[in-house]
Amino acid sequence: MGEKGAKLTDVSTQAAEDLQSRLSTLGDVTTKKMFGGHGIFESGKMFALVDSGGTVFFKADETNRERFEKAGSQKHARMPYFKVPDQILSNDTDLLEWAQTSIVVARNAK
């Protein structure tokens, strides 16, 4: 998901497919093309996004926002999503744990 009018890129598509594959053990993880990027869903609830540049963001609220802030993550515009730090993306165990937390956030969102 990127800027309004952004075009879908191969980088975004590849990053979304990679993320979907790596997180498949967490449940029914799917992707949907949205605004030049991709929404990442688990059982129909969006918990992550990949922007048109291939950057991965996870959903955050008061339960996990501090974790992202301490890692120096940037928020995605006005949306409640924060960039997943590179050190988390490079470690499957950490990635799964951070994603699971964001799935819970998405499920609990109103």
Image (spheres, helix red, strand yellow):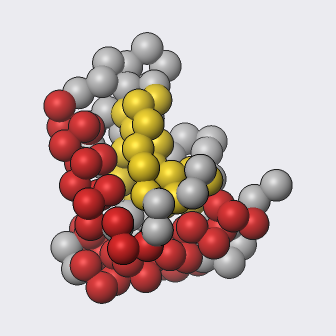
- Compared with residue 91, is residue 30 higher up or lower down, i.e. above or below? above
Quarter of the picture containing the N terminus is top left
User: Residue 87 location, x and y as percent?
Assistant: 24, 76
Label total for image: 0
- Compared with residue 43, is residue 104 higher up or lower down, i.e. above or below? below
Front position in the image: 25 or 12: 25
Front position in the image: 87 or 30: 30
User: Residue 61 location, x and y as percent?
Assistant: 68, 66
Residue at 46 percent of width and 68 percent of height? 27
Residue 85 shows in the view? no
User: Residue 83 location, x and y as percent?
Assistant: 41, 58
Residue at 75 percent of width and 66 percent of height? 108
Quarter of the picture containing the C terminus is bottom right
Toward which corner of the image does residue 57 lie, by quadrant?
A: bottom left
In the current view of this chain or complex, which residue is farthest to the top?
5
Residue at 25 percent of width and 48 percent of height? 17
Residue 58 shows in the view? yes
In the current view of this chain or complex, which residue is farthest to the bottom?
93
Toward which corner of the image does residue 107 lie, by quadrant?
A: bottom right
- Compared with residue 29, is residue 9 higher up or lower down, i.e. above or below? above
Residue at 55 percent of width and 41 percent of height? 77
Task: Tell whether 77 sits left or right of 35.
Answer: right
Front position in the image: 65 or 93: 93
User: Residue 44 location, x and y as percent?
Assistant: 59, 50
